[in-house]
Amino acid sequence: MGVNFSQFDESSVVILKRLALHFPSPTEIGFNDVFPESEAEIDKRAAHIGTLAFLRHEDLIAHDVGSASSFILTRKGIALFNEDIFQHIKNQLNSEVDSI
């Protein structure tokens, strides 16, 4: 028996893309924020909550203390987009040295 990723895929892709789009600002990604047209779908809501729990547990996203459903991408989450935040910061610091 294999793992059924379909519901996880649906939520995780929307969550991660939304957080990347708004990085580094904390962004609301609760079920009603992401799937407003699916409010009555209990199974979809449960899968979304489980997806958030998994992404948090794996340190791909971090919870913003200001809101129950507000999150940001972590270094690991950013790496999923083939980006290295530390290298980016180093590059910015090195380019700023020239302009100081």
Image (spheres, helix red, strand yellow):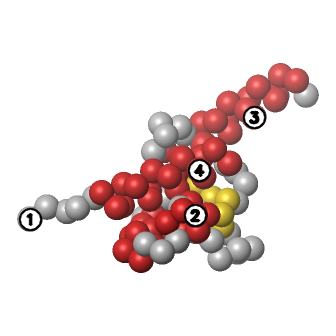
Judging depth in this view, the residue of 32 and 72 nearest the camera is 32
Q: Comparing marks 1 and 3, which lies closer to the viewer?
A: 1
Q: Image quadrant of residue 48? A: bottom left
Q: What's under tag 4, amino acid-wise?
A: Arg
| Total numbered badges shown on the rendered structure | 4
Q: The N terminus lies in which quarter of the figure?
A: bottom left
Q: What's under tag 2, amino acid-wise?
A: Pro
* For residue 30, above or below residue 78: below
Q: What's under tag 1, amino acid-wise?
A: Met
Q: The C terminus lies in which quarter of the figure?
A: top right
Q: Label for residue 36?
A: 2
* For residue 71, above or below residue 21: below
The residue under label 3 is 93
Judging depth in this view, the residue of 9 and 99 nearest the camera is 9
Distance between mark 3 and mark 4 Cα atoms: 27 Å
Mark 2 packing: few (<14 Cα in 10 Å), some, or many (20+)?
A: few
Whether residue 92 sits left or right of residue 59 in the image: it is right
Q: Residue at x 45, y 50 (%)?
A: 13
Q: Label for residue 1?
A: 1
Q: Residue at x 44, y 56 (%)?
A: 12
Distance between mark 2 and mark 4 Cα atoms: 15 Å
Distance between mark 3 and mark 2 Cα atoms: 41 Å
